[in-house]
Amino acid sequence: MLTVGAIANALSGGAPVLMLHRVLEQYDPNNYYYQRGTAISWQRFNTCLLWAVECREQGLPGPVFSFDDGYADNEPAIKALLSAGLPVVLFPVRDFVLTGFSPIDDMAARLNQSELELSAKLRASLIGGKLKACLAKLNADQYRAYRQRWFAIDEDASSAAFLSELQLRELVSMGLQLGVHGVSHRIWTEISPADLHAEIQGSLEWLSSLGCKHPFGLCMPHGKINVDVYQALSAYSLPLFGVDQDYPFAVLRRRWLKEQTEL
């Protein structure tokens, strides 16, 4: 079982950190998650796993796999990594797990099911444009209000399932490391200092209840950080994880693993 210290040593030795969201059974170019680059196929994942094992056997700095949000369909992939003795970290969102609901995933379900008759421009905006950016700033209640106003939809979709607390505890007992990703997934640069404190403390307390006494790090939702947020996060003396971009702060860049990413 790889400990927090062992993974930290791997990072200090130059191990890259891979960023994943969902591992789905088959590749589908029309699927919302593939269009956004937040899903890879099981075939693609297995190629990455074998590459990581090969790196280890050759004495090279193999990757640390990191998963965001806590999707249930990642459980087989996480268990495969743990069984292979590879380092893996999950940054789950507390409210997604407890409620089984996420605004972006609710909208994704509509787009995947062609439930909404949208122009190509509007669909593109929901996938990676201004409307997607707007969704990222909303909590669940705000999203539902806008969904009703924009599309006259009152009912939640049967969207992506998230890991249960029971599943998370089992994975932690197998060696999975957990890190802070917030309570609601709101962007930390867009909320008050008091709300930021509540996001982090609420997540820390929840992770502790899952058996994670030493969180692996802090991962900013959507990779957003500024001077004020950086100073607030520094008080926790935990590694900071971002997305696939350079930062003017001490933030670990994670390599965004997509279906077509070169290894």
Image (cartoon, helix red, strand yellow):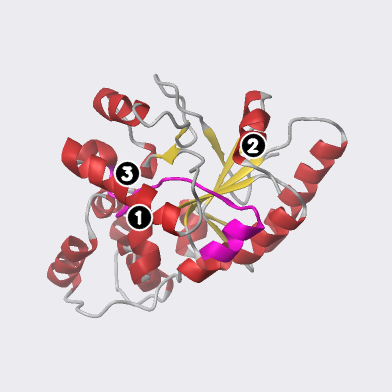
Between the residue at mark 1 and the residue at mark 3, the CA separation in whole angstroms equals: 32 Å
Q: Quadrant of residue 79?
A: bottom right
What is the magenta range? 168-187
> Looking at the image, is mark 3 or mark 2 earlier in the sequence?
2
- State yes or no: residue 184 in magenta: yes
Between the residue at mark 1 and the residue at mark 2, the CA separation in whole angstroms equals: 38 Å
Residue found farthest to the right: 58
Residue under circle 3? 200
Q: Nearer the viewer, mark 1 or mark 3?
A: 3
Q: In the rendered picture of this protein, how many numbered marks are placed on residues?
A: 3
Q: Is residue 48 above or below residue 5?
A: below
Q: Is residue 28 visible?
A: no
Badge number at residue 124: 1
Viewer-nearest residue: 170 or 145: 170
- State yes or no: residue 29 in magenta: no
Q: Quadrant of the C terminus?
A: top right
The answer to whether the residue labelled 3 contacts the one labelled 2, judged by CB atoms less than 8 Å apart, is no
What is the crowding at mark 3: few (fewer than 14 residues within 10 Å), some, or many (at least 20)? some
The answer to whether the residue labelled 1 contacts the one labelled 2, judged by CB atoms less than 8 Å apart, is no
**Residue type indicated by callout 2:** Ile
What is the crowding at mark 1: few (fewer than 14 residues within 10 Å), some, or many (at least 20)? some
Residue under circle 2? 7
The answer to whether the residue labelled 1 contacts the one labelled 3, judged by CB atoms less than 8 Å apart, is no
Q: Position of residue 142 (x, y in %)?
A: 16, 61
Q: Quadrant of residue 228?
A: top left
| Residue at (60, 39) in percent of width and height | 4
SS category of the residue bearing label 1 = helix
Between the residue at mark 3 and the residue at mark 2, the CA separation in whole angstroms equals: 22 Å
Viewer-nearest residue: 218 or 258: 218
> Looking at the image, is mark 1 or mark 2 earlier in the sequence?
2
**Residue type indicated by callout 1:** Ala
